[in-house]
Amino acid sequence: MASFSSRSRTSSLTAAMLLLLGVLFMANLDLTGAQVGICYGMMGNNLPPATEVIALYKQYNIKRMRLYDPNQAALNALRDSGIEVMLGVPNSDLQRLSNPSDANNWVKNNVLNFWPRVKFRYIAVGNEISPVNGGTSWMAPFVLPALVNVFNAVRAAGLQDQIKVSIAVDMTLIGTSYPPSAGAFRGDVISYLAPIVGHLSYAKTPLFANIYTYFSYSGNPRDISLPYSLFTSPSVLVWDNGRGYQNLFDAMLDSLYSALERLGGGNTLDVVVSESGWPSAGGFGTTSDNAGTYLSNLIRHVKGGTPKRPGKAIETYIFAMFDENQKQPELEKHFGAFSPNKQPKYNLNFGGHRNWDLSTEQNATVSLKSDM
């Protein structure tokens, strides 16, 4: 058994390490100004109350939040916080909000009742609805009317320039992603997406997209290398019409831009990355080292745009704030940037400054040969 004095030294060292982790986390998020936010999911039975979560965002200078539903405790805690919010319309509400009166009431109760003390930036009408996904396909007919109705309710309040209304999609709607310039949506989702893209272009509103290099890598590690997925490839791995791709994130996002252009969105419709992250446990390639590497590199990378749209910062929301122990499958429980005890999980760095390594062991990232 350790002596009291050795336990005290260990406790002091642990506290110092946690403090340094917090300072590094704050500095890394602040690198991009307010470009990077974090998604606040609540599917855990051991998470701190909303007031403490909002205080944690402020403590670590996290200036934007994605909230998946109008949780009243969270909205009340957000009053006068200065945090900009992407507020979600839950999928379960889409059918109801296809009625204009219900959409007006939803906006009144969950947006106007809190504005301007809560700084709403976006409303995401539904999340990852697909007309060809058996679990969500029945909701697809309600997405466009709910989107338009919520937009009209926001416009009736004169807030259409301050609060943009869109939908969040995932990358399963893409049929062709390689090379990025050939990006195109699946043929069987065109009729669903085309009028939505038309509305977003009319409203000058970005599309929200959940982009995970992890799932592409874990689904095809033979052709997609870990360094390409983690932003650690030392050189360009894909050339496409004179554009060089050194990471999978850029390739995925540019394939989405190409798909939107083919669907009539032109080259002006923007994309907000509404989720991106890497799990630290529970599946293939899920380690704390990989997750921390991905998040720190993502935060640094999104300042500079993609090869297709260089020099334009990419507004991005990390998934997620906490590990959530009530999610399934297992790997979904381990996406948090923080543990439920409010401690940061990773050594985040200062971009061009020295990368601090607080571990006692040297952890090397495995390099896989890749055709991508």
Image (tube, grey):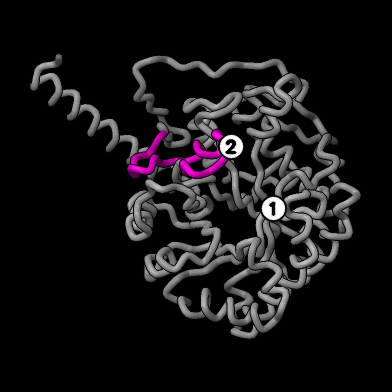
Name the image quarter holding residue 53: bottom left
- Specify the principal SS of the magenta part: loop
Query: Is residue 137 depicted above or below 356 in this figure?
Result: below
Query: Is residue 29 depicted above or below 294 in this figure?
Result: below
Considering the image in quadrants, where does the C terminus appear? top right
Q: Which residue is mark 2?
A: 329
Q: Which residues are magenta?
A: 324-345
SS assignment at label 2? loop
Residue 365 is a magenta residue: no
Residue 147 located left or right of residue 80: right
Tell me where residue 255 appears, x and y as whole percent.
Answer: 78, 43
Query: Is residue 213 depicted above or below 65 in this figure?
Result: above
Amino acid marked by disc 1: Glu
Tell me where residue 145 appears, x and y as whole percent.
Answer: 76, 72
Q: Which residue is mark 1?
A: 128
The numbered dot on residue 322 is none
Local crowd at mark 1 within 10 Å, few (<14), some, or many (≥20)? some
Q: Is residue 37 visible?
A: no
Query: Is residue 237 depicted above or below 367 in this figure?
Result: below
Identified at 47% across, 65% down, the residue is 71
Say which label, 2 or 1, has the lower sequence index.
1
Identified at 52% across, 42% down, the residue is 299
Residue 343 is a magenta residue: yes
Residue 81 located left or right of residue 265: left
Identified at 73% across, 45% down, the residue is 171
